[in-house]
Image: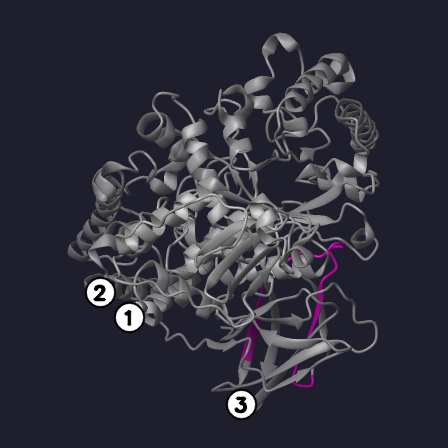
């Protein structure tokens, strides 16, 4: 806590040039800022103790007479209160991690509501997973920031923990790739976690706080519980003994998978896996009870049914009632499963493991952070309303360049009501105002919103239309020539807008401006230019024009190189050298492009596609108190529609529906494409009925199961598409009604095309 007090003193001094005196006291005697835990003698005469007693991370900030009272129910609650004050004074949580340097002011004003601020977290365990760190965080730590350790060590973790506390987070799943030594094997790591009261957990592939990739040695034999259980048990028990002798807060991950992100070794089938994992969980819990001499319900434990483990759970694997079920997304931002009505009654509660960065099939997105905030809001709000209130962990890759999305996620985890469904743009404007200047809040938030929307249609990492695991070569785009030209134009406008806004940025924030705005937007634009011009090269026969397109594609690649070089070596005087790679995993999409010698036939007909955004309905039919509402900043349309409230519910009698009207220019055969977000349901049974004019309704199931070809297509384009052909004999107003069988279905937009 003393560290946080000194940080506040430093924050104020950096802004005003004046240093506050810090003294230790046990009573309020003169005007000042009084900071402490509610249980301290400092606040004995106050009703603060009553307000904060026996609470988890709750805090109280209030002006009382001529004093400012900052109190917390525990250490972290007090620290969060301190940083709430700092942020309200204009200090960014990213002051170190994104160089959002203080701007000098003569005086500081703290705006507080009359009743003060009393807050406590919506979610108990809120944290990040450092992952896929091979091309950013690890080389930066090892070679730039902490060369004395040559790895992600205590000096790096100290900065990470300071950031997390400023974001009101409390949990770390440490980095664990083969390039990084295990967290507990580096001297000082667990001690720095203790100093900052950081709770240590571990990922779905690392039960019992063991980094198998680094710590399971070859001479231990196979990591196979069927054939080597005694060695595995000793391996786990050794870590528990180490934890017992330390003073770290921990959350234990239970179960067993392979050494890394793979299925458990030794099982011949699902039934054997279920039986063995159930047995392992029982043995792990016995170890915990015997080691820590506590009731099991007082030892935080989680079970993460990730990938193949979800199949085990769905097929009958029993998880003890006091263990938290942490549901993963599908690695692309769509939560795979949520607690049902019975699971929501579990003593251990529920949680979510979410991705803002991912390595794996169908394609990585490790380079830029482009997840739409609206998608984060939609999925995490839905999870919360379905009982995920115990733990939220987000895979942040290298932390950079995911700054805004990480903070957005943590804001929701701290206070689920802090950002309403129609307040996502406002949240972004407030962030821009704090990081840069209110003068550009509206314009820059529009740029960032469009940057995310374009990536929602196709992420920069997917622009080569290649895949990985197995890795395939780049291939022609699915975009039409008209779509390619329009996309180029929109990205050019974003880059121009950023250039025009640069003059508004204070000198103190120029480095922050480059890393938070210029690099991601301009690099994404040039990745698009590289592939879009390469594709356009195949649409012309004129050699001069072909050469021009090839030159533009090549220049875009060189621009990305130039931007990345500046990020690493010039920005912030080289502070972030080796943090930014322009080619994580060396996938084909990141290469320069050769001349495109292919010829692509282009449809020269005028595009008469009619597009209707989801929120442009003429009538909506609500059902059983569930109401259709758009989510601000979600989807191709930026206003995708779903049913509120977000709890899981089936419509057994009357289905909820939305209706649309459109006109077509002539008679003939047409096709409607209805675009839904590729969300999931527990039972793979999201069903939509589509009725066009007086035709009979057609029913479609829109969920995918496992990671099949359709799922891959859907997550790469963020769209599950339903196609309905129909004929028009009278070109007047046409009508269409879309009905759904349950909540959780998200309608994005509709397109109508003439079939030739």
Q: As drawn, is 508 to the left or to the right of 158?
A: left
Looking at the rendering, the stretch of residues picked out in magenta corresponds to 669-694
- Residue 571 horizontal/vertical position (percent): 23, 43
In terms of secondary structure, where does tag 2 sit? helix
> Residue 504: which disc?
2
Task: For marks 2 and 3, give the CA distance.
Answer: 52 Å
**As displayed, is residue 220 above or below residue 17?**
above
Residue nearer the viewer, 675 or 540? 675
Nearest to N terminus: mark 1 or mark 3: 1
- Residue 346 horizontal/vertical position (percent): 81, 49
Task: For marks 2 and 1, give the CA distance.
Answer: 8 Å
In terms of secondary structure, where does tag 1 sit? helix
At 22% across and 59% down in the image, what residue appears? 506
> Residue 439: which disc?
1
Residue nearer the viewer, 23 or 417? 23
Asked if disc 1 and disc 3 are in contact, CB closer than 8 Å, the reply is no
Residue marked by disc 3: 731
At 43% across and 78% down in the image, what residue appears? 608
Residue 351 belongs to the span the image colors magenta: no
């Amino acid at each position: 806590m003393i560290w946080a007090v000194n940080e506040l003193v430093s924050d104020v001094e950096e802004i005003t040039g004046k240093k506050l005196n810090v003294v230790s006291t046990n009573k309020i005697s003169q005007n000042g800022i009084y900071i402490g835990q509610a249980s301290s003698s400092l606040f004995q005469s106050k009703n603060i103790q009553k307000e904060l007693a026996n609470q988890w991370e709750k805090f109280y900030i209030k002006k009382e007479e001529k004093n400012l009272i900052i109190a917390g129910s525990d250490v972290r609650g007090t620290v969060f209160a301190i940083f709430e004050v700092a942020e309200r004074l204009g200090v960014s949580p990213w002051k170190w991690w994104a160089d959002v340097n203080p701007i000098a002011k003569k005086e500081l004003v703290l705006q507080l509501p009359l009743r003060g601020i009393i807050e406590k977290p919506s979610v108990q365990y809120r944290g990040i997973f450092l992952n896929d760190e091979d091309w950013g965080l690890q080389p930066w730590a090892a070679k730039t920031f902490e060369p004395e350790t040559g790895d992600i060590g205590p000096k790096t973790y100290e900065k990470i923990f300071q950031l997390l506390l400023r974001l009101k987070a409390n949990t770390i799943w440490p980095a664990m790739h083969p390039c990084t030594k295990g967290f507990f094997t580096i001297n000082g790591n667990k001690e720095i976690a203790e100093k900052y009261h950081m709770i240590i957990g571990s990922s779905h592939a690392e039960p019992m706080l063991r980094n198998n990739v680094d710590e399971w040695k070859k001479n231990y034999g196979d990591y196979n519980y069927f054939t080597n259980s005694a060695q595995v048990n000793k391996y786990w028990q050794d870590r528990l003994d180490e934890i017992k002798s330390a003073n770290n807060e921990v959350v234990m991950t239970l179960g067993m998978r392979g050494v890394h992100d793979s299925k458990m070794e030794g099982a011949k089938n699902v039934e054997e896996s279920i039986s063995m994992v159930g047995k392992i969980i029982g043995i792990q819990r016995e170890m915990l009870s015997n080691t820590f001499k506590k009731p099991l319900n007082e030892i935080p434990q989680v079970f993460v049914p990730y990938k193949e483990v979800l199949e085990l759970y769905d097929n009958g694997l029993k998880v003890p009632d006091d263990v938290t079920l942490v549901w993963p997304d599908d690695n692309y931002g769509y939560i795979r499963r949520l607690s049902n009505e019975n699971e929501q009654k579990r003593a251990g509660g529920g949680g979510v493991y979410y991705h803002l960065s991912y390595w794996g099939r169908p394609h990585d997105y490790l380079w830029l952070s482009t997840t739409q905030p609206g998608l984060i809001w939609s999925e995490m709000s839905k999870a919360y309303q379905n009982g995920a209130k115990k733990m939220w962990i987000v895979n942040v890759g290298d932390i950079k360049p995911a700054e805004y999305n990480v903070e957005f996620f943590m804001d929701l985890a701290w206070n689920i009501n802090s950002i309403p469904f129609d307040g996502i743009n406002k949240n972004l404007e407030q962030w821009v105002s704090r990081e840069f200047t209110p003068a550009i809040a509206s314009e820059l938030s529009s740029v960032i919103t469009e940057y995310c929307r374009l990536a929602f249609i196709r992420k920069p990492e997917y622009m080569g239309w290649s895949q990985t695991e197995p890795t395939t070569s780049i291939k022609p785009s699915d975009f039409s020539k008209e779509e390619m030209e329009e996309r180029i134009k929109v990205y050019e406008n974003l880059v121009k807008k950023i250039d025009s806004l640069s003059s508004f940025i204070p000198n103190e924030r120029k480095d922050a401006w480059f890393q938070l705005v210029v690099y991601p937007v301009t690099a994404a634009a040039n990745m698009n230019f590289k592939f879009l011009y390469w594709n356009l090269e195949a649409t012309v026969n004129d050699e001069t024009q072909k050469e021009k397109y090839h030159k533009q594609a090549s220049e875009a690649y060189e621009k990305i190189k130039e931007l990345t070089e500046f990020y690493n070596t010039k920005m912030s005087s080289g502070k972030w050298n080796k943090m930014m790679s322009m080619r994580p995993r060396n996938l084909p999409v990141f290469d320069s492009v050769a001349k495109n010698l292919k010829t692509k036939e282009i449809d020269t007909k005028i595009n008469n596609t009619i597009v209707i955004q989801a929120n442009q309905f003429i009538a909506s039919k609500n059902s059983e108190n569930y109401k259709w509402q758009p989510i601000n900043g979600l989807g191709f349309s930026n206003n995708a529609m779903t049913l509120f409230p977000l709890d899981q519910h089936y419509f057994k009698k009357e289905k909820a529906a939305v209706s649309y009207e459109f006109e077509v220019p002539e008679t003939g055969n047409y096709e409607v494409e209805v675009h839904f977000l590729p969300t999931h349901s527990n039972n793979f049974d999201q069903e939509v009925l589509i009725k066009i004019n007086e035709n009979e309704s057609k029913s479609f199931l829109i969920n995918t199961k496992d990671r099949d070809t359709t799922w891959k297509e859907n997550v790469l384009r963020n769209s599950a598409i339903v196609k309905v052909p129909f004929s028009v004999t009278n070109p007047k107003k046409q009508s269409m009604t879309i009905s759904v069988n349950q909540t959780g279905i998200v309608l994005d937009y509709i397109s109508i095309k003439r079939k030739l």
